[in-house]
Amino acid sequence: MSNNIKTTFQVEGAWARVRLNIVKFSDEDERRRLQELYALDIVDTPGEPAFDRITRLVADVFQVPTCLITLVTEDRQWFKSCFGLQEELERSRSTEREAAICQYVVAEREPVVVTDARLDERFADNRFVRQENGIRFYAGVPIQTSKGNILGSLCIIDTEPRTIGERELARLVEFGRWVVTEIELRRDLREKELLAERLQQVIAKSESQAVLIRQAFESGLEGRLLCDGSGRIVLHNEKLVEWFRVQPAHYPDVRAFAEHLLQSGEARSPQLLECLEQLLNGHVELFAERLDYRLKDGERRVYEVTGYVISLTETSPQHYYIGIRDRTDEEKIDRMKSEFMSVVSHELRTPLTSIMGFAEIIKERNPEADKRHSYLQTIHREAKRLTLLLNDLLDLQRMEAGQQSYLFSPTDMRSLAAEAVEGWKEHATHRILLQAGPNPLLVYADPERMKQALVHLISNAVKYSPESDRVEVKLMEEDGRIHVTVRDYGLGIPERAREKLFTKFYRVDNSDRRKMGGTGLGLAVVKQIVTAHGGSIHYVSEVGQGSSFTLAMEKYAIPSP
């Protein structure tokens, strides 16, 4: 399809209301999202070539008539760039949020693909779908900032139904990241321009106003250096002293300061000195370099060092601004995201592959009854596994957001443990041995959630004791508390893993354990449930001998009549 064909969306009078309601999600998430969106000061701003280049390129790459960069506010979607949009909409550059498919990308925090909007009940009544030459195909990916907020989407639209492959969608995701990079570069440039403007204003004024530049220089979360034309440090903020425990002013110039950091053995940056020389010698006007730094307590921090040329006034010699930003937490978040995608994609793909494979065999080959029954059992088992994974993900998200509801009532832990063990009766490799007295052991709890915690503990014990044939579940009362202990005779937990054991997506980095799969969600879910019940969980473990996890709850006292 030619790229100069515009998608026609009819606009007749006031906007008609449609059945597509605004998607609801966490008020706190929405507050943070809108706060960052408005802080970027990008909504209702003029078009900018950097963003228009992206939409033109994306439309050309995917051979679609329309590509949009949308930013979703509380009541509308606004187009930062709109390639191929009908002229009247291009002038207004916005629609009501109720009519925006892009709001689903924001709410679901993941790509949304609609092959034919007329056949999708969410959008079939949307006026932009119903009209002639309306939206048929839509693919949108999140515009997600480094803080994790979804500002809107980069989307492609066609007036004909179509599909999009995994590689094409991955490419669209990369274009979405490009949009984020442009937005954050725009923000950083504006901040640096503002800082340079303040420096120009303050330095040009009298001595009595010098305190203002100090205040401006001290503000913010990054370390800052101002150097004259020779590289001599004329100003620095206290953030640098706090981070590196040295006074930059004690060094003759910024080169000596950087050399001290690198020669102390606490910092590592292969190109930093070369970048500084190129900046001071006029070979470059801007650089960005990574700096790894080790604190005295052994903790490692990651910094990004940027430097560029500034002119304080029209007549003053040029100066150099050096900014140092702590990116440690951002890199941790990036690693967590990568680990999450790796773990979850593997754990989702495995059961889906089995389901699709056996379903295709049944469909295409019409196997004999006994084989068909076996295949259906496999499909049911893998579908159940997939459901449990998705439920764990959703439960943990609600628990961490404080949105999980609990239905508390007097509950017999002995009965709950028996039900949890019953589910493992036909397990092929392990016997689950329950040890409990004949009397009820009452706690005040949500029965379903407590059973969920017990099932996770038993599942964890079975998974990490591959060479054993039994798991023991023991209940007892002690000092007014009910204790439930799940004991396995398996691999045990190494010392290095113990601090992170109840962290979501964490799995012990061991080749034997990686073969077992798993998402690392089970113990995180257990911890959340037990904490919400006012209980505690602890464990003892010896590598090669197994582990015991003990859940402790206050005993419920039956009120006197």
Image (spheres, helix red, strand yellow):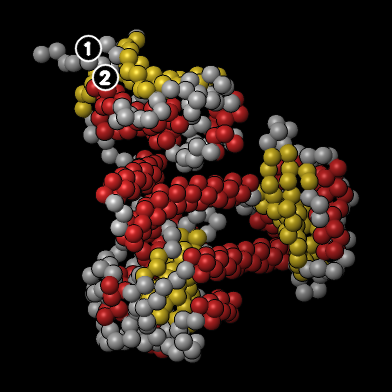
The furthest residue to the top = 479
Contact (CB < 8 A) between labels 1 and 2? yes
Q: What residue is disc 1 on?
A: 439
Outermost residue on the front side: it is: 368
- Three-letter code for the amino acid on which mark 2 is drawn: Arg
Report the label total. Answer: 2
> Is residue 465 something one can see in this rendering?
yes
The span from disc 1 to disc 2 (Cα, nearest Å) is 8 Å
> Picture coordinates of residue 453 (x, y %)?
35, 30
In the rendered image, the quadrant that contains the C terminus is top left
Q: Is residue 377 left or right of residue 527?
A: left
Q: Nearer the viewer, residue 128 or 356?
A: 356
Which residue appears at 33% of the width and 74% of the height? Answer: 116
- Asked where in the image residue 126 lies, by quadrant, the reply is bottom left
Of the residues shown, which amino acid type is indicated by label 1? Asn
Give the vertical position of 234 relative to 157 (above or below): above
Q: Is residue 173 visible?
A: no
Could you tell me which residue is drawn at 62 percent across and 52 percent down? Answer: 220
SS class of the residue under badge 1? loop
Q: Quadrant of residue 538?
A: top left
Q: Quadrant of residue 48?
A: bottom right
The residue that label 2 is drawn on is 414
Q: Position of residue 536 (x, y in %)?
A: 40, 23
Q: Earlier in the sequence, mark 1 or mark 2?
A: 2
203, 492: nearer the viewer: 492
Whole-percent x and y of residue 204? 74, 66
**Side of 213 where 68 appears, left or right:** left
